[in-house]
Image: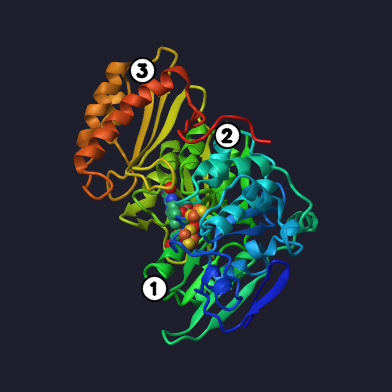
Amino acid sequence: MDCVTFHVNGRETTLRDVSPTTTLLQYLRGPMRLPGTKEGCAEGDCGACTVVVLDAQAPGGPRWRAVNSCLLLVPLLHGKQIFTVEGLREKPGDEGLHPVQRALVDALGSQCGYCTPGVVMSMVEACHRPDLDAEWKLDDQMCGNLCRCTGYRPIREATREVAGSRPPDRLSAALAQKPEPQPALDYGTDSARGPQRFWIPTSWAALFEVMEAHPGHRFIQGATDLGLDVTKHGTHFDALISLQGLDALRTLEVDGTRWSVGAGVKLADLEDASDEALPPLSRMLRFFGSRQIKNSATVGGNVCNASPIGDLAPVFLALGATFIAAAATGERSIAADDFFTGYRTTALAAGELLARVEFDIPQASARFASYKVSKRREMDISAVAAALRVEVDDNDIITDARFVYGGMAATPARAHSAEAAAVGSPFAEATFEACAAAVASDFTPMSDHRGSAWYRSTVAANLMRGFYLDVSGTPMPRLSDRPSGTVLGGTPA
Ligand SMILES: Cc1cc2nc3c(=O)[nH]c(=O)nc-3n(C[C@H](O)[C@H](O)[C@H](O)COP(=O)(O)OP(=O)(O)OC[C@H]3O[C@@H](n4cnc5c(N)ncnc54)[C@H](O)[C@@H]3O)c2cc1C
Ligand code: FES
Ligand code: FES
C-alpha cells in the first residue's frame, strides 16, 4: 500500500499510519508541529486555518489557491505542495517578513492575531492572482477570513497593496516549475473503528476497478461537504475514492453555444468562465461560500450532495441541462429535471458517478437571472434561491418558461403553475404578477431557522416580480459591484 507524500513549506512529508480522515489542519498542528495555522470553527466558516495549495492542474496553468485546511483530508494533498504561514519568512528577523506580512503590519491589520495567519495566507493567494482588478474582487478574496478585533478596512487596504504583486518568493519559483501530474494513490490504515482506505485513481479503468471492488465507497472531491461529516459528525468512512486524478473531470469545454462542464471543475474556475458568457451562473457563484470554499468545491460535489439549498442546481435546471453519468459500462444522459429524485437523493445508480454537466448558452430571445436570498450576503446558505428564465418572441410573447427554486421543497424544483401562467402571455408586469401569485400554489415550503414558510413563499413571489424589473432592461443582468459601508473606494494596485 502507498504512503501519502506531499511538500509543506518546501519540505517533503510522508504519512504512513495516519488515518485518511485526518484533516490537514490536524496534521499540521499535531505531527508536523506547525501551530501557526489556527482552528476557529473546523467547518470552513472563519478562515483561521487558511493555507495555500499549488493546483498544478488548474485551467490556464498552475496557481496557488487559498483553502481551508480544516476541511481537507490529508490524502487529498498527495503529490501536492502547500505553504503555511510558517513557510513565508525566508530570513529571520523583521527584514525576513514576506511582503504580505509587511503590508499587514504597515496597515495595522492585526490586533489579537488569531485570525492573522489565515488572513496572511488569503493575501498570499491575492498577491499571486493577476485578476484582482475590481473592488468587489478584493472583498470576495478576503470574505472567508473573519476578524473580530481589527476591523476590515486595514486588512482590505493591505490586500489591495499586495494584490497581483507577484513577489519573487518561493511560491513564484514553484509556479515556474513544470507542473507534475497527479500521482495515483492506494492508501489505508487500521483504527479502533475499523480499516479505512483511500484511493486516487488516475484512469477511468482504475476508477471503475476500485468502484467495483468496494461497492460501499463514497466519492470525495473538494471535501467542503464531506469534510463536515468528519469534523462535525465524526463519521467513519471506510472507503473513499478521490476523483482529483481524472483530468477529464477538470475540463470545461465550450463548443459554440454548447458548454460541457466536468464534475471536477472548481467553482472558482466556473465563476471566472461564466462571468461574461453566462451572468446568471456567475451571479449565483458570487455569494457562494468564500474564496477558500470555491477554490476547493466542485460542480459534481454541489450537484451530487443533492441539497435542496444547493445553489447550482436551480441554474442548471433553468438551463435545461443534461447530466452525464459514467459507469464501467459506458455513459448515459439524465435530464436535469429527472436528476433530483428526493431529499438528498439523485438518479445516479450504484456503479455510476457524475462525469459532467452539459447545456446550451441561452439565445438572444432569453431573459434569465438568478437570485440567492440569505440572512447574510457573504458566507451564508440560501433561505431561497431562484433561477428564472423566459424565452420571448418578436411580438413580446413568452414562448417558454423555466422558473426554478431552491429552498422551497425537498429538492430544487420548478414552479410549474407559474410557468404555465407565463407561457403564451405577454412579457409584461401583469403576467409576472400572475406568476408571482401562482408560485404560492406550486410549493408548500417548510419553516426552519432560515425562514418561515410564509417568509419563503413571500420571497419566492417577490423574486418573480423583481425578475421582471431586472430583465426588462438587460436580458441577462450581471451583478453590480457591491456597495459596502466599511470599504473605501479606489482601484487595486
Ligand atoms: C463554509 C461553507 C460554505 C458553503 N457555502 C455554500 C453555498 O453558498 N452554496 C452551496 O450550494 N453550497 C455551499 N456549501 C456546500 C459545499 O461547499 C458545496 O456543496 C460544494 O460544491 C461541494 O463540493 P465538493 O467538491 O467539496 O464536494 P465533496 O464534499 O467532496 O462531496 C460532496 C458529495 O458529493 C459526492 N460526489 C462528489 N462528486 C461526485 C461525482 N462526480 N459523482 C457522484 N457523487 C459525487 C460525494 O460523495 C459527497 O457525497 C458550503 C460549504 C461550506 C463548508
Ligand atoms: S477553522 Fe474555521 S475555516 Fe477552518
Ligand atoms: S486580529 Fe483579532 S481576530 Fe483578527
Task: Give the residue type at disc 3.
Answer: Phe
Which residue is identified by label 1? 234
Q: Which mark is residue 135?
A: 2
Q: Between 492 and 173, which is closer to the camera in this rendering?
A: 492
- Say whether mark 2 is within 8 Å of ligand 1: no
Q: Where is residue 307 in the image (x, y as percent from the top left)?
A: 36, 53
The quadrant of the picture occupied by the N terminus is bottom right
Task: Give the residue type at disc 2.
Answer: Glu
Residue at 46% in and 39% down: 284
Could you say which quadrant of the image residue 369 lies in? Answer: top left
Give the Cα separation between the discs numbered 1 and 3: 52 Å
Horizontal arrangement in the rendering, residue 466 relative to residue 259 (left or right): left
Tell me whether circle 3 and circle 2 mark residues in contact (CB < 8 Å). no
Q: Which of marks 2 and 1 is in front?
A: 2
The residue tagged with tag 3: helix, strand or loop? loop
The residue tagged with tag 1: helix, strand or loop? loop
